[in-house]
Image (cartoon, grey):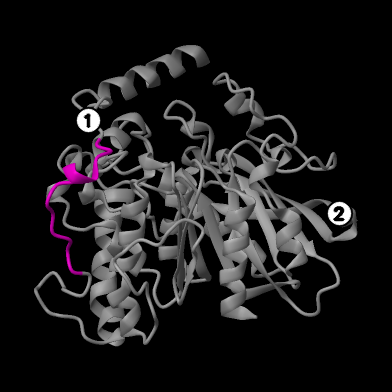
Amino acid sequence: MKHIETFLLALFVSTAIMGQNKNAPVNYDESQVPNFELPDPLKANDGQIIETAKLWEKKRRPELLRMFGELEYGVTPRQTGIKVKHEVVATNPNAMGGLATQKQVRFTFTGKNGKSVQALLLLYIPNNMKGRVPVIVSYNFHGNQTTTMQEDVIPSPSKEIVKSLGSEAWVRGEQMSRWSYEMALQRGYAVATMNYHDICPDSPELMVQGIPSLLSGYDVRNRKENEWGAIGIWAWGYSRIADYLEKDKQIDKGRMVVLGHSRLGKTAVWAGVQDKRFKAVISNDSGCGGAALSKRVFGENVGRITANFPHWFCPAFNRYSENESSLPFDQHELLSLIAPRHAYVASAEDDSWADPRGEYLSLYYAGPVYRLYGMRGLPSKEQPAIHQPQHYDVGYHIRAGKHDVTPYDWQCYLDFLDSLWH
């Protein structure tokens, strides 16, 4: 019966995306970028020009937040009816060779329907630091056990669910290169990670085994136009991690950072936009639907992303497939919603799929909103050379290499955060 249900859901998903083009043309030629006009983040829907931070907060910010919810990521419910229980299941005061205290915390999410979902948070807190410490929160792709070789790190609960898709990439330490724990700890930062599949498996067929199974009236097979998808649910999960961390006596709740790579970079930005407890929001190679401008139609585009990942966004976003010119917003306005908190965007030279120039310009064009608060955005429309990070009240760098997270990226992020807080 379970196999039949999975087949029927797969058939539904295939049918639902008919008419979308998984092979929508992809442009990698700057000379072929269409002429486009970006919406003004400081012009309200009724035409009023926003001239003060107070009016931005009262009028324009809510307008944009509502637009992104209703037309791209889906509306986050005010109340989900889900209760969350935390249980510390393991501690190690001498982790990382004595550099840190390790905590592993089981989250149990229980819906009104009585069903439960479990997730596991891995937290490293630097030892020998006076007072509370800032924390960087970031999902991982293949389980907590893949971020380190430490044998006492418990595999993430979703490991067996997602491996049923055929993935073998759940080996201990397999993604260590993306996690510069020691660097962050030595510089006084705690790091918290959770596998994003624990919150919601990244598959239309398997979503029903995550948080969606706890939501009253949520039908993966037949979502409403403005109903949230996986990115919205993962962003909600980031906020539940913040709920736990702000109660930890070793964590400085005024210096919480959310960081994400690729699809999880899109998620980190959407989480940071909605949850003001994240004082810095870091996008690493987030591309289309993340930091990159959609109207440039460069690299991955709305047609490709909505066809290949129909479960990520709300169904309403499909109307802009191969129709980016009709978007009433663009991603620079999403980044502007982070102000007056701090935004950081990072790109990779060889990652044309994510449109590095579009990522840079998006942060640049968020500048007028930062200026409302007397803050400094990026000073020039010209993208900097590789390995020339720009750190103001917002930050940007582009490095050599491919779509990835590297120690160089971590170094730049920590340098930026130090410039803000140390």
9 versus 199 height, above or below = above
Q: Is residue 251 above or below residue 152?
A: below
Left or right, 53 with respect to 155, comes to left
- Residue at image position (41%, 78%) is 340
Q: Position of residue 27 (x, y in %)?
A: 24, 37
Direction from residue 337 to residue 160 in the image, left or right: right
Instruction: Give the residue displayed 24% in from the left and 57% down from the top.
Output: 330
Label 2 sits on a secondary structure element that is: helix
Q: Please, what is the three-letter code of the amino acid marked with disc 2?
A: Ala
Q: Position of residue 101 (x, y in %)?
A: 83, 60
Q: Nearer the viewer, residue 90 or 43?
A: 43
Question: Residue at image x 35%, y 61%?
Answer: 383
Q: Is residue 35 magenta?
A: yes
Looking at the rendered image, the disc whose residue lies closer to the viewer, 1 or 2, is 1
Question: In the rendered structure, does residue 116 fall within the stretch colored magenta?
Answer: no
Q: Is residue 203 above or below residue 185?
A: above
Where is the C terminus found, in terms of image quarters? bottom right
> In the rendered structure, which amino acid carries the disc numbered 1?
Pro
Relative depth, front residue between 174 and 85? 174
Q: Secondary structure at mark 1?
A: loop
Q: Give the residues in magenta.
A: 27-40
Quadrant of residue 37 within the rendered picture: bottom left
Label 2, on which residue? 95
Q: Is residue 101 visible?
A: yes
Q: Residue at x 32, y 38 (%)?
A: 300
Question: Who is closer to the viewer here, 353 or 283?
Answer: 353
Q: Which residue lies under the disc numbered 1?
A: 25
